[in-house]
Image (cartoon, rainbow, N blue to C red):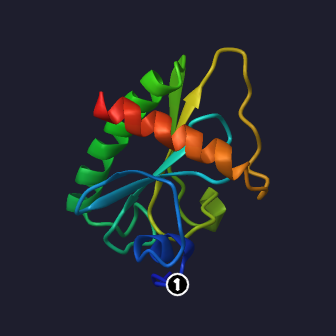
Amino acid sequence: MNYDDNNIFAKILRKEIPSNVIYEDDQTLAIMDVMPQSDGHALVIPKSPSVNLLDASSESLSHTISIVQVIARAGMKAFQADGITIQQFNNAAGGQSVFHTHFHVIPRYDGIVLKGHTGEMADAELIKTHATKYIDALNA
């Protein structure tokens, strides 16, 4: 599969579509998922174009996973989570729906099942509040 530079994450990276940014450096962007499966569901996206883990460069993946860890730690703290689920999907058959490499960072809570990824966007104010929690945890 060839990389499509009109995918939603490419547009977010180019600032053509707004997002709730919680972290950014020269190689990665971390944003809130607008269809969260749990409070604090975030995405970590490498800036270099790749469809998924299978065609991403090892250098990009190495940096990106280090930021996944930073965001996971912040998510545990900010949302007083009991655990964290990290998800990364490859190709449609593997569950991938946006064809730009990305990692899901999902705070988890004992006894609470993840919401489905239904395609319905969460309340925008709630997402902004969650972004602020991450930013505060990252700056603490």
Asked which quadrant contains residue 37, the reply is top right
Judging by the rendered image, the residue that carries numbered circle 1 is 6
Asked which quadrant contains residue 25, the reply is bottom left
Q: Nearer the viewer, residue 81 or 128?
A: 128
How many marks do you count on the picture? 1
Horizontal side of 127 relative to 71 (left or right) equals right
Q: Look at the picture and state if 47 lies above or below 133.
A: below
At horizontal 41% and vertical 77% (from top left) the residue drawn is 14
Q: Position of residue 27 (x, y in %)?
A: 25, 62
User: Do we see residue 77 in this rendering?
Assistant: yes
Q: Position of residue 20 (x, y in %)?
A: 51, 55
Q: Amino acid at mark 1?
A: Asn
Q: Look at the picture and state if 69 lies above or below 2.
A: above
Q: Nearer the viewer, residue 118 or 57?
A: 118
At horizontal 43% and vertical 22% (from top left) the residue drawn is 77
Secondary element at tag 1: loop
Horizontal side of 111 relative to 10 (left or right) equals right
